[in-house]
Image (cartoon, helix red, strand yellow):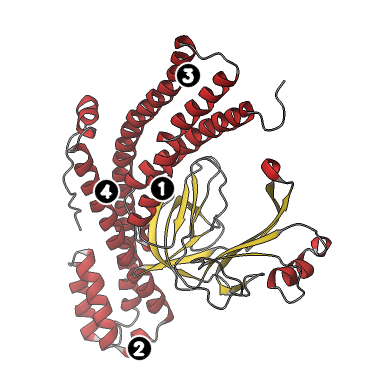
């Protein structure tokens, strides 16, 4: 039997931590490859499935106020922790979490898409990457470069902000005789954010369905950072290296401490430990090859999906043009010039006809005053924007795909699968 402070306890803890770090690192590696293989989409062109978007955060149905820091924001997540125990058995336990439940908007130059933030990890591939980039000089007792994360410990002082917060929000702990901590993460309106997650229809019953990006439990892919894709990828890559590459080494150190404590060090026991650690790295190699294969297939599917989405939007535009022409015909009885213009519009291809109709509205104020014409014109402008965004997404997908299959070791997998370079697609208007 081992007594308190026995090295075997340390060995078991290190071995367990190494195994967990390896498992967690594999999840971070999967997230890393998903980011690399997912083209960035414009907000207006986001379609159901895995989606990656960058822009700035905007409020959805009003701003929120963070419960601890009292910050105006679009999202917050506040955690209350308590410390207990002493020495090696000292630990920090989560008491309660306060989190805003409303979605937020991610806005770029093309429009907005809804996002359901998730800052607390909910799976091995989920990353909480909201970084810290704003000095919180107005927060008392600040230690270190704390910014968007407000973290403080409670003092036995009625004027201490943590004491006040605990007294108001969780009064049963206001007399707790050990350390309490509050951590608060928030996203302010206008903060730059990068998001990758699962896009779905927000409300299928809406007349104009909206898309929302969220953390789908089935896929467990979600990442949000307050910077660019490059910064998010750098953060995830660091997590992957620490976990997947460092985990087996940590496991072996813990294993060695255990066998040394049991006086069981031998060439066979050392080989057995090395075999387990080596097996982890072989597993990682297998995951790498599988990730390359899945990534190329995912990219190919993204291209097919993007092409189908553009074709659908083109068809939608083709149905809007005749509707606009019909509205114009309502005024043709009064204007001979309009009759001639309608005949001209019928001979045009869709994009030219759409531009001519908009120009026509400028020349005829009575058309601009028509509610039907205005509504159809707005729909046409929106479809044109969606077409442009979807085409860009398609071209970005093709460019990323061609780049990947031309690089090592992806080219070996691509050759084995018979995957070839894809040309940029030219749509017939």
Q: Earlier in the sequence, mark 4 or mark 1?
A: 1
Disc 1 is placed on an element classified as: helix
Residue 29 occupies quadrant: top left
Residue drawn at (24%, 47%) of the image? 400
Circles 2 and 1, Cβ within 8 Å, touching? The answer is: no
Please give the residue where the numbered disc 3 appears in the rendered image: 273
Report, in whole angstroms, how far the alpha carbon at label 2 lies from the one at label 1. 57 Å
Residue drawn at (22%, 66%) of the image? 351
Comparing marks 2 and 1, which lies closer to the viewer?
1
Circles 3 and 4, Cβ within 8 Å, touching? The answer is: no
Disc 3 is placed on an element classified as: helix
Disc 2 is placed on an element classified as: helix
Q: Residues within 10 Å of mark 1 (few under 14, many from 20)?
A: many
Q: Residues within 10 Å of mark 3 (few under 14, many from 20)?
A: some
**Badge count:** 4
Query: Going by the picture, which residue comes out furthest to the bottom?
Result: 365
**152 with respect to 352 (left or right):** right
Report, in whole angstroms, how far the alpha carbon at label 4 lies from the one at label 2. 44 Å
Report, in whole angstroms, how far the alpha carbon at label 3 lies from the one at label 4. 44 Å
Residue 313 occupies quadrant: bottom left
Q: Residues within 10 Å of mark 4 (few under 14, many from 20)?
A: many
Which percent across, then down, holds residue 356?
22, 76
Query: Going by the picture, which residue comes out furthest to the top?
Result: 268
Please give the residue where the numbered disc 1 appears in the rendered image: 236
Please give the residue where the numbered disc 2 appears in the rendered image: 366
Please give the residue where the numbered disc 4 appears in the rendered image: 397
């Amino acid at each position: 039997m081992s007594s308190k402070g026995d090295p075997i306890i340390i060995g078991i803890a290190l071995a367990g931590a190494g195994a967990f770090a390896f498992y967690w690192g594999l999840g971070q590696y999967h997230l890393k490859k998903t980011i690399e293989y997912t083209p960035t989409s414009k907000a207006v062109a986001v379609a159901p499935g895995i989606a990656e978007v960058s822009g700035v955060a905007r409020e959805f149905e009003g701003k929120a106020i963070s419960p601890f820091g009292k910050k105006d924001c679009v999202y917050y997540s506040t955690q209350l922790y308590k410390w207990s125990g002493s020495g090696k058995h000292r630990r920090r336990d989560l008491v309660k979490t306060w989190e805003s439940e409303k979605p937020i908007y991610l806005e770029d130059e093309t429009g907005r898409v809804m996002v359901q933030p998730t800052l607390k990890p909910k799976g091995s591939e989920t990353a909480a990457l909201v970084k810290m980039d704003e000095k919180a000089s107005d927060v008392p007792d600040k230690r270190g470069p704390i910014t968007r994360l407000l973290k403080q410990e409670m003092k036995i002082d009625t004027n201490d902000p943590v004491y006040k917060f605990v007294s108001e929000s969780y009064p049963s702990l206001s007399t707790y005789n050990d350390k309490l901590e509050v951590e608060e993460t928030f996203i302010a309106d206008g903060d730059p954010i990068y998001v990758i997650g699962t896009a779905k229809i927000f409300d299928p019953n809406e007349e104009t369905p909206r898309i929302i990006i969220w953390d789908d439990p089935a896929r467990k892919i979600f990442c949000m950072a307050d910077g660019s894709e490059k910064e998010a990828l750098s953060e995830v890559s660091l997590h992957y290296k620490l976990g997947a590459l460092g985990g087996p080494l940590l496991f072996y150190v813990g294993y060695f401490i255990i066998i040394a404590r049991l006086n069981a060090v031998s060439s066979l026991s050392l080989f057995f430990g090395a075999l387990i650690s080596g097996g982890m790295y072989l597993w990682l190699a297998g995951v790498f090859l599988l990730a390359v294969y899945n990534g190329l297939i995912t990219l190919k599917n993204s291209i097919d999906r993007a092409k189908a989405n553009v074709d659908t939007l083109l068809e939608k535009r083709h149905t809007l043009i005749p509707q606009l022409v019909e509205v114009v015909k309502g005024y043709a009885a009064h204007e001979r010039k309009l009759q001639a213009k309608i005949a001209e519009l019928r001979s045009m291809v869709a994009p030219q006809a759409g531009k001519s109709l908009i120009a026509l509205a400028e020349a005829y104020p009575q058309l601009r005053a028509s509610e039907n014409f205005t509504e159809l014109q707005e729909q046409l402008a929106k479809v044109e924007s969606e077409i442009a965004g979807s085409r860009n997404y398609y071209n970005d997908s093709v460019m990323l795909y061609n780049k990947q299959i031309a690089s090592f070791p992806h080219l070996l997998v691509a050759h084995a699968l018979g995957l070839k370079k894809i040309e940029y697609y030219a749509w017939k208007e």
